[in-house]
Image (cartoon, rainbow, N blue to C red):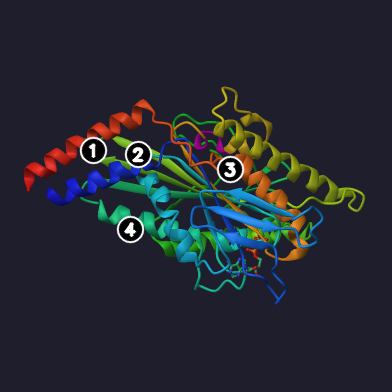
């Protein structure tokens, strides 16, 4: 009883901290590779500030200041990053929809953050694995109170087409198209895409491998496409308590296509088409997140497959986290600036100002409940 109260008190407090509909932006700077010089990063603040400077000093001092919820420098570990992401992930088990995006140019570390190192080493696993591992742990911890069923889907969006990466069919059936449409019964908005039950991280790892193989097979037909498609791992959580009431929520883990601008004069044909689709869908994502951050009444979800697919998990009751990945090398400076600008635009954190903290009536209500719990706790002591 006592411990549960303490825990509930803490959970409630976290809920107040983690306002629904809030959009968080974290920046992650990968270590420089191949011993290249790294003179771009000037300062990383504990408070989420970041100062970078133009290596060519084209402007007077060439320094630019950004403000995010958090900045992870080159020495931050996967565990450091996960620690700051865990509360958000855990809230999925309480019925919240959560979306986590990895944004940035190709080579900036998106896949490293989400899946782990490119060597496929089982050390340094990424958020996808750690998240599921955590969800299974919570499921076990709560088994006396709640029974959870966890399923995953894995798709990619390439040239505005959704493809089912967990399909059993041989890759000869390529391109496994799936249509986005809401199914009220199942709550799924990709009801045709393969849905697999998972009970352990081992299940998840083997499914992810299957998905990667499907992705790789379809890639060979059109060169390595992995940086030119969005990959989405969706975890569906169904919980049922003893009274029979249920919760349903999902966690989208999105490794976005590379955000680099391609020089239109240099690419033609298929490559140009890909680039145009990527630009369009990333721009749409930016528009949606900005509209949500500004609490606009119209949110342009329908402008791309990506935002349409994630619609139920963005804004409203959902929680969104974007990792803006940057490469620290001087020759990436242009892309780094454009990534940071995109991320800043999506962020609810204002430059040079403390975090905007609107107190909604809901927060006040939760604060009231915390007070009540505190009193109850005091009574038990
Ligand atoms: P992206 O998915 O954005 O194209 P990757 O995740 O593939 O980029 O990263 C590019 C390379 O840099 C890979 O070899 C990856 O293992 C390495 N890398 C990325 N981020 C880190 C990091 N934080 N620590 C160590 N190596 C990293
Ligand atoms: Mg990648």
Query: What is the tally of numbered marks visible in this picture?
Result: 4
Label 2 SS: helix
Quadrant of the image occupied by residue 246? top left
Foreground mark, 1 or 4, reads 1
How many residues crowd mark 2 within 10 Å: few (<14), some (14–19), many (20+)? Answer: some
Q: Where is residue 111 shown, x and y percent of the image?
A: 61, 60
* Label whose residue precedes the other's in the sequence (3 or 1): 3
Q: Position of residue 48 (x, y in %)?
A: 52, 52
Mark in the foreground, 2 or 3: 3
Give residue 160's position: percent from left, percent from top: 71, 41
Q: Quadrant of residue 39?
A: bottom right
Is the CB of the residue bearing disc 3 within 8 angstroms of ligand 1?
A: no
Give the main secondary structure, helix, strand or loop, of the magenta stretch: helix
C-alpha separation, residue under disc 1 versus residue under disc 2: 10 Å
Query: Which residue is under mark 1?
Result: 370
Start and end of the magenta stretch?
310-314
**Which residue is the site of mark 3?**
351
Which label sits on residue 281?
Answer: none
Measuring from the top left, give residue 73's x and y in whole percent. Answer: 56, 63
| Of pointers 2 and 3, the one earlier in the residue sequence | 2
Number of other residues with Cα within 10 Å of mark 4, as a class: few under 14, some 14 to 19, many 20 or more: few
Residue pointed to by mark 4: 137
Q: Look at mark 2 in the image and give the residue it sits on.
A: 16
Label 1 – label 4 distance at C-alpha: 26 Å
Cα distance, mark 2 to mark 3?
23 Å
Q: Disc 1, disc 2: CB below 8 Å?
A: yes
């Amino acid at each position: 009883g006592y411990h549960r109260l303490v825990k509930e008190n803490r959970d409630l407090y976290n809920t107040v901290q983690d306002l629904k509909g809030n959009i968080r932006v974290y920046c992650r700077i990968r270590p420089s590779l191949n011993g290249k010089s790294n003179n771009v990063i000037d300062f990383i603040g504990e408070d989420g500030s970041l100062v970078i400077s133009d290596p060519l000093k084209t402007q007077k001092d060439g320094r630019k200041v950004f403000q995010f919820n958090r900045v992870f420098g080159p020495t931050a570990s996967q565990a450091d990053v996960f620690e700051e992401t865990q509360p958000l992930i855990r809230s999925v088990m309480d019925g919240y929809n959560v979306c986590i995006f990895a944004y940035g140019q190709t080579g900036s570390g998106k896949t490293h953050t989400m899946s782990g190192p490119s060597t496929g080493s089982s050390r340094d696993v990424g958020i996808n694995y750690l998240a599921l591992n955590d969800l299974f742990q919570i499921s076990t911890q709560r088994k006396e109170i709640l029974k959870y069923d966890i399923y995953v889907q894995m798709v990619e969006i390439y040239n505005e087409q959704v493809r089912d990466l967990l399909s059993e069919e041989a890759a000869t059936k390529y391109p496994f198209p799936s249509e986005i449409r809401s199914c009220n019964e199942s709550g799924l908005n990709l009801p045709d895409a393969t849905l697999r039950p998972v009970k352990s991280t081992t299940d998840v790892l083997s499914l992810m491998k299957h998905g990667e193989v499907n992705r790789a097979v379809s890639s060979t037909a059109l060169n390595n496409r992995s940086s030119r498609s969005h990959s989405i791992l969706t975890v569906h959580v169904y919980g049922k308590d003893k009274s029979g009431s249920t919760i349903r929520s999902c966690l989208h883990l999105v490794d976005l296509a590379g955000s680099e601008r391609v020089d239109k004069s240099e690419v033609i044909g298929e490559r140009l088409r890909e680039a145009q689709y990527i630009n369009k869908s990333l721009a749409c994502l930016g528009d949606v997140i900005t509209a949500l951050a500004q609490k606009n009444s119209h949110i342009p979800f329908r402008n791309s497959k990506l935002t349409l697919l994630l619609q139920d998990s963005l804004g409203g009751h959902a929680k969104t986290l974007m990792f803006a990945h940057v490469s620290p090398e001087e020759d990436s400076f242009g892309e780094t600036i454009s990534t940071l600008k995109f991320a800043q635009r999506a962020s609810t954190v204002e430059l040079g100002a403390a975090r905007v903290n609107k107190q909604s009536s809901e927060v006040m209500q939760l604060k009231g409940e915390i007070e009540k719990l505190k009193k109850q706790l005091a009574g038990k002591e």
